[in-house]
Image: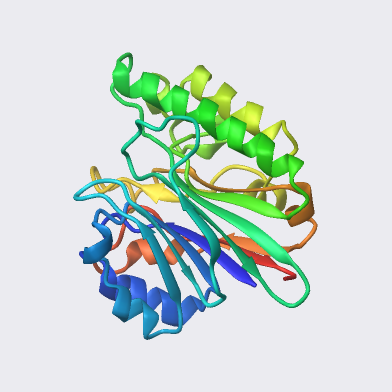
Amino acid sequence: MKLATFNINGVKARQEALCAWLDEAQPDVVLLQEIKSVDEGFPRELIEDKGYNVETHGQKGFNGVAILSKLPLEDVTRGLPGDDGDEQARWIEATVANERQALRICGLYLPNGNPVPGPKYDYKLSWMTRLEARARQLMADEMPALMAGDYNVIPQAEDAARPEAWTEDALFLPQTRDAFRRILNLGFTEAIRARHPGPGVYTFWDYQAGAWQKNNGIRIDHVLMTPACADLMVDCGIDRDIRGREKPSDHVPVWVELAF
């Protein structure tokens, strides 16, 4: 099974690019972030015509996450537990299963947190605390599971072409990286780093200042797998060339292949 995460940065604006990538990459499951659409506005029929089941957790003009799956989606839940008053659409999870096994898949769009200091950064850190709590639950369950999406976290200096430019940014502050590390240290495997160690591996290039042309990128889209899920990993990668196409998102897809 091939599973991918992709911050699409507006599904309506990029539906043609999304469909072209789906046809080319043929993922079985896709976790989308920043769909920037209410549920009713998502181009559902376009995706369903390609053989996908579609579940969304949308929000008008901002945020929004979705799951596209060629396998049936069961036990779908929306919203990260821990704050009933949180109205931002940033989390969706479901179970996919075949005749042999089941997998819990969680799609997330972690808050950016800028400007720092301020309420947006406070929200980011509190969201990450809730994420850690959910991660602990996933680790305690026997079912293989993964959490994938736009984490808005630059884990290490080597995950940025110019780390010195990010030292005061919410994506790279020590508190942010510490919160991410606490989750990893629960026993998760970070897919890309497990297979592609070293610098120069990026998933995001800003639209400004020729970042793509200069390869001034950062790596903020991650796939975290429980041990039972990591045991299933066959390969993983980044569809980097998507960034150079017409009307691209500023993110590119990250994918894992599982023996599922």
Task: Check the image and tell me how it is coloured.
Answer: rainbow
- The image quarter containing residue 100 is bottom right
Q: Nearer the viewer, residue 89 or 217?
A: 89
Q: State whether residue 62 is above or below residue 45.
A: above
Q: Is residue 172 visible?
A: no
For the C terminus, the quadrant is bottom right
Q: Nearer the viewer, residue 46 or 73?
A: 73
Count of numbered circles in the view: 0
* Residue most extreme to the top: 117
User: In percent of the image, x 43 and y 33: which residue is there?
Assistant: 162
User: In percent of the image, x 46 and y 38: which residue is there?
Assistant: 161
Q: Position of residue 215 (x, y in %)?
A: 40, 49
Q: Position of residue 151 (x, y in %)?
A: 47, 40
Q: State whether residue 111 is above or below residue 225.
A: above
Q: State whether residue 254 is above or below residue 175.
A: below
Q: Is residue 185 left or right of residue 215?
A: right
Q: Is residue 226 visible?
A: yes
Q: Is residue 63 left or right of residue 256?
A: left
User: In percent of the image, x 38 and y 27: which residue is there?
Assistant: 165
User: In percent of the image, x 40 and y 33: which residue is there?
Assistant: 84
Q: Nearer the viewer, residue 128 or 142?
A: 142
Q: Position of residue 164 (x, y in %)?
A: 43, 24
Q: Position of residue 120 (x, y in %)?
A: 31, 24
Q: Nearer the viewer, residue 24 or 166?
A: 24
Q: Is residue 44 left or right of residue 221?
A: left
For the N terminus, the quadrant is bottom right
Q: Is residue 57 left or right of residue 100?
A: left
